[in-house]
Each structure stands twice: as C-alpha cells, then as structure tokens.
Amino acid sequence: MVNTHNHNGFFWNDPKTYNFYQDWRAARLNATESAKSDGFVEISDLSNPTDSEKSELIRRCRETNLALYQAPQKDSMRDDLRHDLRAFAGAFDLRIAEQHRSAGDQGIVALTETNAPSQAGYIPYSKRKMGWHTDGYYNAPDEQISAMVLHCAKPAEAGGENRVLDPAIAFIRLYDENPDYIQALTHPAAMVIPADGDQRPQSVGPVFYGDPETGALQMRYTARTRSIAWRDDALTREAVAFLRQTLEAPDPMTISLRFKAGQGVLTNNALHDRTGFDPNVLTKSMRVMYRVRFTNRVKGT
Ligand SMILES: [Fe+2]
C-alpha cells in the first residue's frame, strides 16, 4: 500500500479517495511549480544550519521531496567537507547507509573519475552520462534508500548537468494517464535487478511503495535496459514505456541545473540523472560530487 501523504494517506485503487487525490495532485504541482523558481536555500554554515535554514529545507522536502541549497565554497581539505556533510545530515536526523561497497570514509562517497580497481568500469566513476534513477534501486527491499544528499565540491569544466524530478510528479503523470499503471508498478515483483556476481544478491520489488517509517510515497527506478527484468505483463510494459517517455521528454516539472561548488540537493531520493562531462579533458576530470545515502527520510517530511 502506498500512502502519498504522511497523515492523509489515500490508496490508488480506492474511488472514495479520488477527491483527496485531486487535492493532493494540485498541491504537489503548485509546490513544484514554485520550487522551480525558488532557487537555492542559502546555508551560512553547512555543518551547522540555522533553525530557519533547516525549516525552509524541510518545508521544500515535505512539499516537493527535494531542496536545493547553496553553502559557502570552502578551500578546505576534502575531509572537512565529509565532516560538514555528516553534520548537515545529522541536523535532519538522517541515518547514513554505510554498507555500500564504495561508501568510503564515513559513508560518504566521492563521485569522481577514478582508476581505483573497486570502482573502475562503473559509470558513476567515469565521465559518462547516467540515465534516470533513484539511488540504491538495486538494494534489497529492507535496505532501501529513503533520502540522499548530492553535493558539488568541484564542477566539471564542461557538462555534468543534473536533472531532478520529484517521484510524486512521476506518480501523478502515470495515474492521470491510466490509474492501472500505478497498480502495475506497486506490484511487489514489478522490477527485478539480477544479482551482481557475489557482490549483491538479486533484488525484487515494486517501483512505488510506502516508506516503512512514515508511509510516504517512495520510488525505486532505473531507466537502464540491461541487467533488469520487468514483470512479464502487458500493463507493466506499457507503464514502464510511458514513464520512460515522460522522463525523457522531459516533464516540464523537471529541474535541470549544473551545480556550482558548494551547491547541492537534499532529497527524499528523487529521480535524477546526469549528462556526460569533460569530453575534451584527456586526463582525469576534476569534477567531484559527494553523495550521502540515508535509510530514512528527511525529518518531518
Ligand atoms: Fe544517483
């Protein structure tokens, strides 16, 4: 079951909740429309956001599942930035998911081009584009990623743009097209990610599901077409094709941006992608994005 709101849950297949859906839908679209022009929340000290900075970030995450922020760019060592990000996450009661094989120091991953044997060959650690996804879509159902921070330490010389979309908007597009699409994508075996050697077991689960702690709508998705099996059912195939098309169009509610140093996004694991970058840099690109994944949603959202 998916509650699309913490306190006023409605169920996609219950006609009595139709009016609630219409209200929720209107509120979501309005909030996303304004978020697109609201820009960044200014944070004076990433390691210690003020009460008003925090409440604005929480408000945006509650209304649109994401908040763009801008903190002073530091010339400091990378270790200081890890410390700051950890403290920033703590301000929202976020629990860092440390089990990822690249979690590195303090559960914080530097996404940067690398030749390190454990990461070489994986797209996140290359200059290549990454398709739409939510983080940790391949995790076991009881280890889902509910929130994340993506923080820019150093932008690319060229490219490296991100697009971000609230999963609630994807839900709305699907539901409006055909409510049965939502039924197909909440099926517990809608999406299967096969095991990755002995690194990771097979992962079977829904695309849309209720966050175990709050009941809020969460999404698990990847646009990749290899190493994935969708449930063998006509409606599922149609729903996935419609979703893919919506994301690639892209949906007008999509935020597209190229983060500058010190900027980032705090999000309840919104859909995102990135363009390729630094095609003319023959050596290693200097772009560095930090990624922190959490097992719970932003406090109060
Ligand atoms: Fe990601």
Image: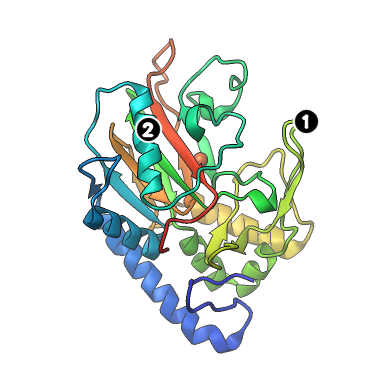
Question: What kind of element bears circle 2?
Answer: helix
Estimate the x, y position of residue 268 in percent, counting from the top left: 46, 54
Residue at the spot x=48%, y=71% of the render? Answer: 6
The answer to whether any part of residue 108 appears in the image is no
Rendered image: mark on residue 213: none
Residue furthest top in the image: 283
Estimate the x, y position of residue 288 in percent, counting from the top left: 39, 26
Residue at the spot x=23%, y=45% of the render? Answer: 43
For mark 1, what is the residue? 198
Q: For residue 51, what is the image quadrant?
A: bottom left
For mark 2, what is the residue? 83
Residue nearest the observer in this picture, 74 or 274? 74
Which three-letter amino acid code belongs to the residue tagged 2?
A: His
Q: For residue 13, what is the image quadrant?
A: bottom right
**How has the structure been colored for display?**
rainbow
Residue furthest bottom in the image: 16
Crowding at dot 1, Cα within 10 Å, few <14 / some 14-19 / many 20+, comes out as few
Real-space Cα separation, disc 1 to disc 2, in angstroms = 32 Å
